[in-house]
Amino acid sequence: MPSHNKSQPSQRQLRVGEQLRHIIADTMQRGHFHDAALIDAGKVTVTEVRVSPDLKNATAYVIALGDENIEEMIPALNEDAAVFQKEINRQSSMKFTPRVRFVFDKSFENSQRIESLLHEINYSEKPEES
């Protein structure tokens, strides 16, 4: 019998997360927000949505394209979470509409930092030509 790692999301969680990511991204593209901070919500990319095992909570990881101020947008997105929940309810056949929470996806920032550090190492350790 295969061992099931509880820290890994189930196939159902992954499938629901991907469905939610599409619905949330689609909703952002259309706009219709009351908060001025979300005027450029179409420039926000939803990189991943992680769903809790009971499917009642979802965390949407987002980044901003270009110069958008994601620090201002995250609280506004969380304030307007009802807009996303209404769309999820309308577009999915889920028994319960998960509560959505938005957070900044730091994985891209971290990978850029690692890339930069590796780049610096490459230049500083080049052998001298003789």
Image: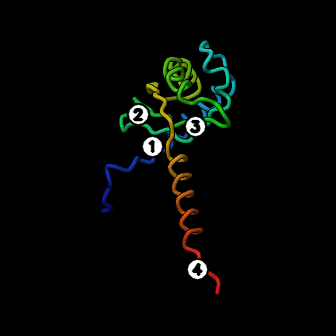
Q: Are marks 2 and 1 in contact (CB under 8 Å)?
A: yes
Q: Which mark is residue 55?
A: 2
Q: Which residue is mark 4?
A: 127
Quarter of the image that includes the N terminus = bottom left
State the residue at coordinates (55%, 23%).
84
- Please tell me which of labels 4 and 1 falls first in the chain: 1
Residue count near mark 4 (Cα–Cα under 10 Å), binned few <14, some 14–19, many ≥20: few
Report the Cα–Cα distance between label 4 and label 1.
52 Å
- Between disc 2 and disc 3, whose residue precedes? 2
Closest to the camera, between mark 4 and mark 3, is 4
Secondary structure at badge 1 equals helix
- Residue 15, compared with residue 100, is above or below; it is below
The three-letter amino acid code for the residue at tag 4 is Pro
Q: Residue beneath label 1, please? A: 12
Which residue in the rendered view is the most extreme toward the bottom?
130
Q: Alpha-carbon distance for marks 4 and 3?
A: 39 Å
Q: CA distance from mark 1 to mark 3?
A: 25 Å
Question: What's the amino acid at mark 2?
Answer: Leu
Q: Which residue is mark 3?
A: 63
The answer to whether marks 4 and 3 mark residues whose Cβ atoms lie closer than 8 Å is no
- State the residue in front, 72 or 87: 72
